Image (cartoon, rainbow, N blue to C red):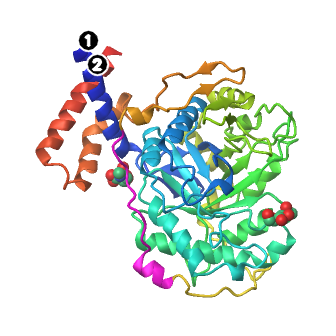
Amino acid sequence: MLFKSSRIVLGIYLLIRYACAFIHPIEVNGKQFVDSVTGEPFFIKGIDYQPGGSSSVNDNQDPLSDPGKCARDIILFQELGINTIRIYSINPDLDHNVCMTMLAAAGIYLILDVNSPLENQHLNRYEPWTTYNELYLRHVFKVIEQFSNYNNTLGFFAGNEVVNDSRSAKYSPPYLKALVSDMKKYIHENAPRAIPVGYSAVDDLHFRVSLSKYLECHDPSNPYNEVDFYGVNSYQWCGKQTFVSSGYDKLVNAYRDYSKPVFFSEYGCNEVLPRQFEEVQALYSSDMYTVFSGGLVYEFNQEANNYGLIDTDADGNAILLPDFRTLQSVFKKVRFPSTLEVRQAILKDNVVAMAPAVKSKCESSYQNLDISHPVAANLATNMIKSSVKVRESKYVDLTLEQLKTPYKIFESNGKEVLRNARVDIVSNFDGEDLKNIRRLHKHRYRSEASSYSKFSTLVLITIGIIELAFQLSVI
Ligand SMILES: *[C@@H]1O[C@H](CO)[C@@H](O)[C@H](O)[C@H]1NC(C)=O
Ligand SMILES: *[C@@H]1O[C@H](CO)[C@@H](O)[C@H](O)[C@H]1NC(C)=O
């Protein structure tokens, strides 16, 4: 018995070590996100996550700074069956290693906004020239510098709904383009891989098309200032609707010729309660999957605006709200299209098929936007050259204890659930990926050659493979 349990502990320990290396970076290929290792299209099935709202980010805490709360929420993310979260604000001076490792081990990606409501950490949409300065750019670069070391960072949002009315549309657009350029140059010079940069837009018909076109357009004098993906915050499917009655058909049509991936960076109208999330089925259906790469439901935590899936009590315990279980059952039915299905569907639609090849040239004007305001140039040059300093970020070894949460989880009727639950290490061990372990391990340990001798690596891998084979055969 003792032998068996210590063997399982060893197995799990090894799994954890392995899991860290196994989350494959996502990259952009045409209108699709793809898994950079398998080449398969990647669809976002996720939620927006900002416990306490953006204003709860401060010197001491942010959504990824408390491992116990991360474990609680990641257990629930896995219960929901998601693969991505979006966070709106973090503090790049805090330590995020444990939470990011736990997310990676759980197979969950992060899309991160680089702004926060704190001073010098966002653009003023009506007077952007007062806030687009070196202090602000330093903050943005610190976020990038810290999170670019994690393979499960899927992308960065330069802004969220910065253009949200006619006044902001008059001043902000050129600043967004400049910021995208600064971010992409920083990544190009300093990050280990080309992490995509996008923008998250309010879905307002005044600039649905024009802003997306402006941010995508190709300027030969600056190849960095085009977004790599576009997020749309859409709340137009409320209650009982269809693809057509919701207006999703027009939305899809508006982005068919977009050259980059598009997805819902927020969705889940709450005008009709309780929510049924019937739009989920449409989002991953052949009506949409050639144009939309999935989306993120707004939002995980309950706030005053009443979109939450869970609430927390004063002790930090979680209470599942009814929407949690509804969304879980809807998500369970989602089947992602296969590589072949996506390829065939794209070939059937000429506009979609041609879109990535057609680089839209920057025009001199865009409907309902003013792009004429000049932006101070070269503010970022020195920081990009020398890179900014941040706390070291990397995946770390997790203990079994860290995979559990000190908090309790209750159903909405008060019944405790998921007692003793643990973050599930999902990695590529099942089925055919077992074959790849050896190859992947070589990969991982090569970059960590200083901490492992070749011999102990070999021993560890051998034990791991035997252990895994044993465990799989037991199951
Ligand atoms: C990150 O991904 C790259 C490319 O797949 C891989 O070479 C590297 O080992 C990964 N690093 C970690 C820490 O997982
Ligand atoms: C745009 O955002 C600002 C700041 O949050 C807000 O005051 C304004 O009302 C918003 N405009 C619209 C049309 O929602």
- Provide the residue designation for mark 2: 5
In the rendered view of the protein, which quadrant contains the N terminus?
top left
Residue pictured at 58% horizontal, 39% vertical: 341
Q: Is residue 229 left or right of residue 147?
A: right
Q: Residues within 10 Å of mark 1 (few under 14, many from 20)?
A: few
Q: Residue furthest front?
A: 314
Q: Is mark 2 within 8 Å of ligand 1?
A: no
What kind of residue is marked 2?
Ser
Specify start and end residues of the magenta stretch as a single range.
381-398
Query: Would residue 191 be visible to someone looking at this image?
Result: yes
> Percent x, y for residue 358?
63, 67
Q: Are marks 2 and 1 in contact (CB under 8 Å)?
A: yes
Instruction: Find numbered disc 1 in the image and state the secondary structure of the residue it sits on.
Output: loop
Majority SS type along the magenta span: loop
Amino acid type of the residue tagged 1 in the rendering: Met
Which of 234 and 408 lies nearest the eye of the viewer?
Answer: 408
Give yes or no for residue 395 being in the magenta stretch. Answer: yes
Give the residue at mark 1. Answer: 1
Of the pair 300 and 468, the residue shown nearer to us: 300
The residue shown at (54%, 50%) is: 110
- Above or below 250: residue 108: above
Asked if 127 appears above or below 277 in the picture, the reply is below
Residue 233 magenta-highlighted: no
